[in-house]
Amino acid sequence: MSAMARGGVVARRLQEPLGLVAVLAVGSSVVWWYGLSAYNSRIVAVMGLSIVVAAGLNLLTGVAGQLSLGHAGFYAVGAYTTAMLVVDHDWPLLATVPVAAVLCAALGLLLAAPALRVQGPYLAMVTIAFGLIVHDIAVEFPDVTNGPAGLFPIALPRIAGRELTLEELNYLIVAVVALTMYTTSSLIRSRWGRTLRAVHGNELAAGSLGIPVVRVKRLAFVISAVYAGVAGSLFAAVNGFVNPDPFTLELSILFLVMVIIGGAGSVWGPVFGAVALTLLDRRLSSLADYRLLVYGGLLLLALYVVPDGIVGTVRGRLRRFGRAPSTAVAAVEPWDPDLGPDAARPTPAGDGPLLEARHLSKSFAGLRAVDDVSFAVERGRIHAIVGPNGAGKTTLLNLISGVERPTTGDVLLAGAPLAGRPTHEIAREGVARTFQNLALFADLTALDNVLIGLHLRAGASVPQALARTPAVYREEQALRDEALALLAFVGLAGDAGTRAGDLPQGHQRLLEIARAVASRPRLLLLDEPAAGLNHTEIDALGALVSRLRDAGMTVLFIEHHMDLVMRLSDRVTVLDYGRVLAEGTPAEVQSDAAVVEAYLGTAASPTPRPERGAAEHQTKEIIDAHG
Amino acid sequence: MLTVEGLATGYGGARVVHDVTLHVDEGEVVALVGSNGAGKTTTLNTLAGLHRGSGTRRRGRVVFDGHDVSGMPAARLMRRGMVLVPERRQVWPEHSVGDNLLLGAFSRRRDKTFVGERLDHCYTVFPVLADRRRQPAGTLSGGEQQMLAIARALMTAPRLLMLDEPSVGLAPLIVERIFEVVAQLRDDGLTVLVVEQMVGTALGVADRGYVLERGRTVLDGRARELLTDPAVQAAYLGVRSDTQAIDEEVAAR
């Protein structure tokens, strides 16, 4: 490994600890500098707590793509939990923080329930409603919350029997901010951070890679709510009293604007956003009535001037000046597709076919896309499905991979039924696939796409990821090396740092194959892998698929490039009108008169091409027959 | 009709197209071929005014009909008669076939008689679309969607039609039909610039071809010559075309 590459590895290793130290140093200096006046000291405290809320919200909205306009609600629940326990039950303040965190986690889980059903503007409305309900409860239940007057006095927290000064409380908040940044950045850069981004990018693809989409969304809500709850709890300490006034929709919007202006999805964006907007908020305190107007204007301006947020835009500029983020490695071990004893799921011994479809049918609004299809794929073989456009090939693949449920019939993997089970469970059984219309995470790099594909082969738990333990770090290094090796395996070694959506179409297909193969599936389903490849590239693809087969993988693929189908497959099934038209060895199928007529056409037979004048008529006829 | 001189563009900081020089004469079909990443789609999108090369300085000159149209946005290029059928068809799946076609004529929407005439014309060229005019485009088969994408482009009565990989994902029989349609459109007087991976099929229909390599036009010539030139085949086109391969296998039996 070259010195430069080693430098890069060390830099990555120290990223989070250095961030922690930097936050502590900068934060403490700020507290020390402003500690002189109580007014400034409060601004610093609120700024720190805003960073905590924004960093948590960033995980949910920026990284996982689930919009929330109700985070003031969690902030309020945290504040009220602490206030009630301290004022009414004489709890020590610091002991109330974990209670606030647990309560907010539970509420996060509750709010996640509707979020699993709705997206975008509807999700925004649900979360707004949550914030409003919390605010109204605070106002309308005076027996518990003391209504608009609020709860007070809340004494400052005590450590070792001594009450902290305001300045010391601020140092405590700095420590919480540092911890927040350490955990959020660890999470974002971990296996689970990639999972959140995967759910944001493409739920279908995420599921096909074994990621339980529903659970991941819940996780995002819960984690994000905990940060807001802890911040709210400390807010009660800073403020000395808690009433409903601060916890308005306006505050929820402010949190969201912090995330967006700072740079949604980036690690440090929330810090910049929270600092900038807290300072601005103070400047505007005399213009209370116009505050929302200013935020609105600011948001529009920001989306125009810094569309990727402050951090995203600055990073983009740096990249333009040639300082691309380092993804280069000196030399990678060649990827070994061996499914042997080390593989996650070795093919269980057995003589029967690996995959069996029995009388499989699927109807869409009366149209039978797949009509009583039965076939079997033998272990360690390459099996092709061909047929005219609209014959039901992709639907068949969807039925096998769990994207669609069959109307009737069964799918058996090594004898175990798959039909009706969710996509991510089928992926866990060792079925991976690519998509005809490409379902890459277009905004992520090629490397990240493959790393998400490795999800099932990684083991770091969420707490481990938050703490970024040495074991997690070592696992990440190993995954990264394997992902780079996989990219080299499909011929994309030089594109690791390229945004997947910027790759040429043919290379996007190869990237999808690398991502699917990453989990070392027993059964690999490829939907038109050669579309968009030229002849040289198709040859390379053929060699690649053969190697996977030789390593023990079973491959079922849909393809229109007949030379590839003929050369590669052990067996071919021909579909037409959703039914099996023919099945056999490539040679048998190719000489089948019905197949030539329905599918192969003149390309496979010596009959002369139709006259040009007849083309139009013929086009209509053939398209009609196979629509 | 179309002259491109020293075109260069890219994405972010990365230049993808370095030096593309080509010309298309009135009434001919010109094929642009090359491997993945050669810059074919980027070239086509730039010519169509869809890719403005953010972050990378666009260089070079594009002349259409004697006017410099470099850097002109897509809507204005369409009004001048240059239109693109994009990669992977990009029809609006929820909209009906008829609505997809009407949206194709958006830039001429005020001229009702013109739009009506074009609609009739498209339905004559592609009778299958007339049968399905009320059906959502997403329910069409791949071949039909490609026909729809071409028909949608024809709605503005273009003089230069640019096609980006019309064969992708289509059964062999349908690929043949699509290229027969291309030949027919040429015979009706349309000029066509087509990007295609199925080199044999594309050059079989084209009059001339250009080979693009790493963002540069490195070879050009009559389509027949490119197809049969062994050096060209080995270096840029792969060993043989689909059609040839299957023909040979059939002959061998």
Image (cartoon, coloured by chain):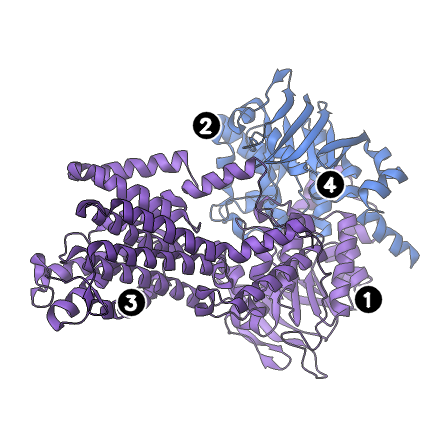
Chain colours: A purple, B blue
Circles 1 and 3: CB atoms closer than 8 Å: no
Q: Position of residue A518 (x, y in %)?
A: 63, 64
Of marks 4 and 1, the one in the foreground: 1
Residue at mark 2 = B112
In the image, are marks 3 and 4 on the same chain? yes
In the image, are marks 3 and 2 on the same chain? no
Residue at mark 3 = A101
Q: Position of residue A106 (x, y in %)?
A: 30, 70
In the image, are marks 1 and 2 on the same chain? no
Circles 4 and 2: CB atoms closer than 8 Å: no
Which class describes the residues within 10 Å of circle 2: few (<14), some (14-19), or many (20+)?
few
Residue at mark 1 = A588
SS assignment at label 2: helix
Horizontal relation, residue A213 to residue A583: left or right: left
Residue A512 picture quarter: bottom right
Of marks 4 and 2, the one in the foreground: 2
Circles 4 and 1: CB atoms closer than 8 Å: no
Q: Amino acid at mark 1?
A: Glu
CA distance for labels 1 and 3: 67 Å
The residue at 65%/57% (across/down) is A484
Horizontal relation, residue B196 to residue A306: left or right: right
Which class describes the residues within 10 Å of circle 1: few (<14), some (14-19), or many (20+)?
few
Residue A565 picture quarter: bottom right
Residue at mark 4 = A614
Horizontal relation, residue A475 to residue A139: left or right: right
Which class describes the residues within 10 Å of circle 3: few (<14), some (14-19), or many (20+)?
many
Q: Residue furthest bottom?
A: A350
* Closest to the observer, A284 or B236: A284
